[in-house]
Image (tube, rainbow, N blue to C red):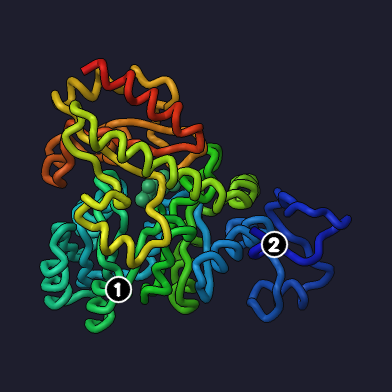
Amino acid sequence: MWAGEPQESSHGATQVPVVHSVGFGYEDVPSWQAAATGETTGHIYSRNTNPTVEVFEEKLRVLEGAEAATSAATGMAAISAVLHGLLEPTNRVVSVKDTYGGTSVLFAEFLPRLGIEVDLVDTDDGDAIIDSIERGCDLLYLETPTNPTLKVLDLERLIAAGKDHGAVTVVDNTFATPVNQNPIALGADLVVHSATKYLGGHGDALGGVVAGRADLIDTVYHYREINGAAMSPMAAYLLLRGMKTLFLRVEQQASNAMTVARFLEQHPKVTQVNYPGLPSHAGHEIARRQMRGFGGMLSFSVEGGYDAVKRVIPQLQWAHRAANLGAVETTVGPPATTSHVECSADERAALGIPEALIRYSTGIEHVDDLVADLDQALEAI
Ligand SMILES: *Cc1c(COP(=O)(O)O)cnc(C)c1O
């Protein structure tokens, strides 16, 4: 909770001040120049660095056990900075079909345009991922658990294979959060987060962060400072405020999600429940090994396809019907309007996302209320 917070502050303020200033002034040119060239510490311009944003980066660096961290305006800006900062034409990327919708658009549309080859392998097939790595891999990009089907990748095994072939290894840790999973401890070079989700936790601030090897963070930061998608000081403040309760929230969300998943699993109108905490989940054993908890995200399929999805969702009283996730309130939606809004129906089908699927981001409400709410909503089928 205290991680990254400065020891000293002006006026003895106990909370991190929001420094809205765009520029930072110096008395003379030599001291200004020393700060500008990095010889001394000091801020120059808030697109590059900002005191409030820096505290957020430091908190995340500590939580992920990383050498360095840098931030961006959104999760997608952070992911774009990693991919555009580190890759060049003729490079080959290996990833999986189940990455976040926006990330999969980078892989399918924007990177190939730059002459970067991307192989998206079946997420369930660890051997096929390793086969692809062996055909050449400059960057291995993983995400686990995945959005929205909650598949679990064996990070230690895949990262080791990537490193054997000289790849930079990157893990999107948004769903797990640093509370439940630390990919760097499992060998990853870089970890990315959409801070918009669990880190902030209140659905009121956009942000992204990258943590990991200092030499790689330098390169990613350099791209991001020029690309210009910087985190705003106000967003950094809201994210810092949210992160004070990160552990409490994530523990409550995981405990609620487990109860909800067990309830859904025995419900006659529910055909499939995806939650890594369920012993029936295909990735349960791997999740137990590499995660400290199973998180608050789950998804389930209902009898009757997309028509049934459209009937159930409006009946829910204790859930926002919104694209966000990871907030203290429960949020619900179909992939077509949430995780994979950027994809066409054909693309979703190709990614193996069923049209009967409902994504459920469990909040911190009383779990009895959530179960009762789902129970009455499922009667609409
Ligand atoms: C939301 C999300 C992103 C993108 O983050 P934004 O802050 O919306 O840009 C990336 N990865 C995952 C897993 C996400 O859930």
Q: Which residue is mark 2?
A: 5
The residue under label 1 is which amino acid type?
Glu
Residue 53 visible in the displayed image:
yes
* Of residues 169 and 289, the one drawn nearer to the viewer in this rendering: 289
* Of residues 119 and 335, the one drawn nearer to the viewer in this rendering: 335
Q: Residue at x 39, y 38 (%)?
A: 361
Q: Tag 2, which secondary structure? A: loop
Q: Tag 1, which secondary structure? A: helix
The residue under label 2 is which amino acid type?
Glu
Residue 317: image x %, image y %? 42, 20
Q: Is 8 positioned to the left or the right of 80 in the image?
A: right
Q: Which quadrant of the rendered structure holds the N terminus?
A: bottom right
Instruction: Give the Cα separation between the discs numbered 1 and 2.
Output: 31 Å
Q: Which residue is mark 1?
A: 156
Q: Which quadrant of the rendered structure holds the C terminus?
A: top left
* Of residues 314 and 322, the one drawn nearer to the viewer in this rendering: 314
